[in-house]
Image (tube, helix red, strand yellow):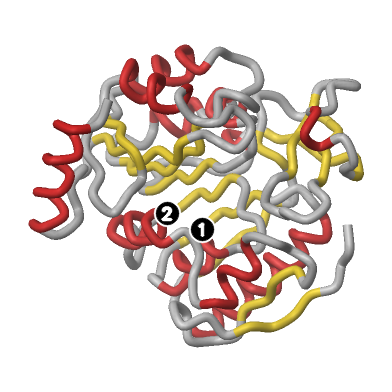
Amino acid sequence: MDSATRIVRPRALGFDFEVLADDLIIGPAIEAGSWADDETYLFRAHVAAGTKVVDLGANVGWFAVQAVLAGAEVHAFEPVPVIADVCERNLRRAEQVGRGKAILHRVAASDAPGRASIVLAAKNHGDNRVIESGARPADLADGETIEIELARVDDRVQGPVGFLKIDTQGSEWLALRGARKLLDASPQLAMLLEFWPYALRGATPQELLTFLFERGFTMGKATEAPYPMDAARILRQALARDPVRGGIDLYGTRGRPFHVTSAKNRLRALVRSLKEA
């Protein structure tokens, strides 16, 4: 992976932020002003001074930086050395502006400690996937492969936490399995989770959803107007998308309000819940 970077000043932050120079997705969006607007809105609504946040798959640190600016304590996990270096520098910049603090764990969240291979996408530097031995994804056939460290969240962070973000490009189930103590210790928890059946490792998509619903989470799509969805509806909508480029970003809460947006968006959510399959 090319280690060249550039400094940008996104409107949503108002201070210098570092991105990978040859990234085609996340970097240009941040340079244009922001990244993942709907998810960021939901994240900010639940994160405040004193909140403890865990960010699995932190990449260059967009969400972790938001937490520091809000005054939160954030544990960010990013295993790719070049990206982790950028994330580290962004977190230290944020600490100079905000009142929060950040700890960077240079590992991938999994269900057991160890070592693994990760395939790095050539241009979309947010799409790096841990793989089983020799099981390179067909859509990453040309990607560079490096070795990284794996760790359980439970061995690095103790609960309770107020927000958990998991965007690990298919390793979400394994990350959750390695965070069961943290989940049990966090009765008031909000969550963002990438749900991508094509890349999911270690479980079926239904098993992952069942795991969350059995633990009392209310789940829906991470949009500006989210509405609660049952597991069948989530799975149906996820599988209706292009398998390689598809997937759904999910938002969930347990012991915390699900609806945190405006009254107008709550009405939109109700309408969407009646219209969507």
Residue 68 is left or right of residue 231, and the answer is right
SS at circle 2: strand
First in residue order: circle 1 vs circle 2: 2
- Point out residue 92 in the picture as x, y percentages from the top left corner: 63, 76
Residue 182 x, y percent position in the rendering = 47, 34
- In this image, 50 relative to 98: left or right? left
Residue type of the residue flagged with mark 2: Lys
Distance between mark 1 and mark 2 Cα atoms: 6 Å
Task: Examine the image and state in which quarter residue 190 appears.
Answer: top left
Residue position marked by numbered label 2 in the rendering: 52
Mark 1 Cα within 10 Å, few/some/many (few <14, many 20+)?
Answer: many
Taking the spot 79% from the left edge, 28% from the top edge, the residue there is 137
Image quarter hosting the C terminus: top left
**Which residue in the structure is indicated by mark 1?**
74
Q: Where does residue 229 sit, x and y in percent of width and height?
A: 26, 28
Q: Residues within 10 Å of mark 2 (few under 14, many from 20)?
A: many
The percent position of residue 85, horizontal first and vertical second, equals 77, 65
Location of residue 97 with respect to 220 vertically, above or below: below
Inspect this view and state whether residue 225 appears.
yes
Residue at image position (59%, 77%) is 31
Task: Identify the element where label 1 is drawn.
Answer: strand
Q: Name the foreground residue: 114 vs 82.
A: 82
The residue located at (33%, 16%) in the rendering is 232
Label 1 amino acid?
A: Val
